[in-house]
Image: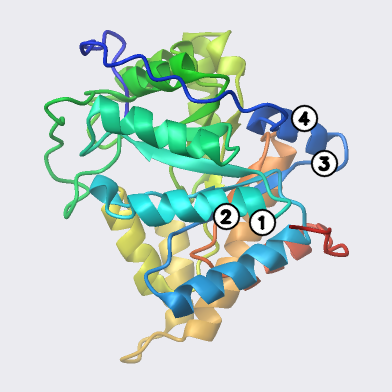
Amino acid sequence: MYSNPMPEHSAPGPAVRPTPVSGARSVVQSLHAHSAAMRVPFSVEFNPPRDAAGEARLWRAVRQFERMHPAFVSMTYGAGGSTKDRTARLTGDLAQQTTLLPVAHLTAVGHSIAELRALVGAYADCGIRNMLVLRGDPPGDPLGEWRRHPAGVQYADELVRIVRDLGDFNVGVASFPQGHHRSPDLATDTAHLAAKLRAGADYSITQMFFDVEHYLRLRDRVLEHDPVEGAKPIIPELMPITSLRTVRRAVELSGRELPATVHERLRRAAGDGPEENRAAVRAVGIDIATEMAQRLIDEGAPCLHFVTLNFAKATTEVLTNLGYGVRAAPLSA
């Protein structure tokens, strides 16, 4: 998911230019507007549901968050483009049927440059100006070998340039508080992030983490490496933990481990029985997310980005703990 300071440049494809997206806010503009009205904006991440029941649950969460006015919302993209069609449809629905500002995920894995350009054009046709550009994980095994599509790109900064060349898009990229698991060291990982930002990315969203110090050190590293690019927003990603088993799996797939202190708090709550005490784990998880979010607010994070798994309740509880209120739902299409 990281980019190369000296990327291989693929042969240019046909000159496809989507219709410019006029009047749509950018993520950076939205962050500034929300910052004027509250101490720190928040945003949320959704996943394409697998069936009709899952889609109904997604829309319940969407309407709940709509009443809290996030700075933006994002819709993830399955490994290898496995949810491409659903991601595109649902992101378009968010743009056209809600008052929310949607960010479309776009990944390089498994796609030719022509396909990527067509996807950007489809998003533009829905009025979507904001893209989160990722290299993406290999399908089947996120930690497995990454293979470039024969007619695709190798690194995320190449994809950033493609999107920026296609029109007036606001582009985000991924950043990694502990370094990407494929990067040999933190210095190399920092250089990769700076390269993506120099390629035209406007901000980054971090990989999920559970130690605020890792985020703060990332911010320091990028600013030291490149003071200009390091000044761009680095948005921390948080996930309120509601299941020890679920968070263990999520962290494992990222190539990282839970901090020992966090794991011990959750393990104690889970208990020693054959089944974890979900209610106790959830309560501790909400406390951990609230503590982390408050520290990030105090340290000047530009936004709090929450992984929701298409449920609103846990994230809403954290936001309520932090003093973010629910207001009357705005009118929507």
Looking at the image, residue 54 lies above or below residue 68: below
**Location of residue 200 in the rendering, given as x and y in whole percent from the top left corner:** 49, 15
**Location of residue 327 in the rendering, given as x and y in whole percent from the top left corner:** 87, 62
Q: Is residue 266 visible?
A: yes
Disc ID at residue 97: 1
Residue type at mark 2: give it.
Answer: Asp
Distance (Cα) linking label 3 and label 1: 28 Å
Q: Nearer the viewer, mark 2 or mark 4?
A: 2
Among the two numbered marks 4 and 1 on one chain, the one whose residue lies closer to the N terminus: 4
Residue type at mark 1: give it.
Answer: Gln
Mark 1–mark 2 CB contact (< 8 Å): yes
| 25 sits left or right of 235 in the view | right
- Examine the image and state in which quarter residue 6 appears: top left
Q: What residue is shown at x 74% (from left), y 40% (from top)?
A: 298
Q: Local crowd at mark 2 within 10 Å, few (<14), some, or many (≥20)? A: few
**Location of residue 312 in the rendering, given as x and y in whole percent from the top left corner:** 62, 68
Task: Give the SS element for disc 1.
Answer: helix
Residue type at mark 4: give it.
Answer: His
- State the residue position of label 2: 93
Disc ID at residue 39: 3
Looking at the image, residue 295 lies above or below residue 177: below
Q: Quadrant of the C terminus?
A: bottom right
Disc ID at residue 32: 4
Q: Nearer the viewer, mark 3 or mark 2?
A: 2
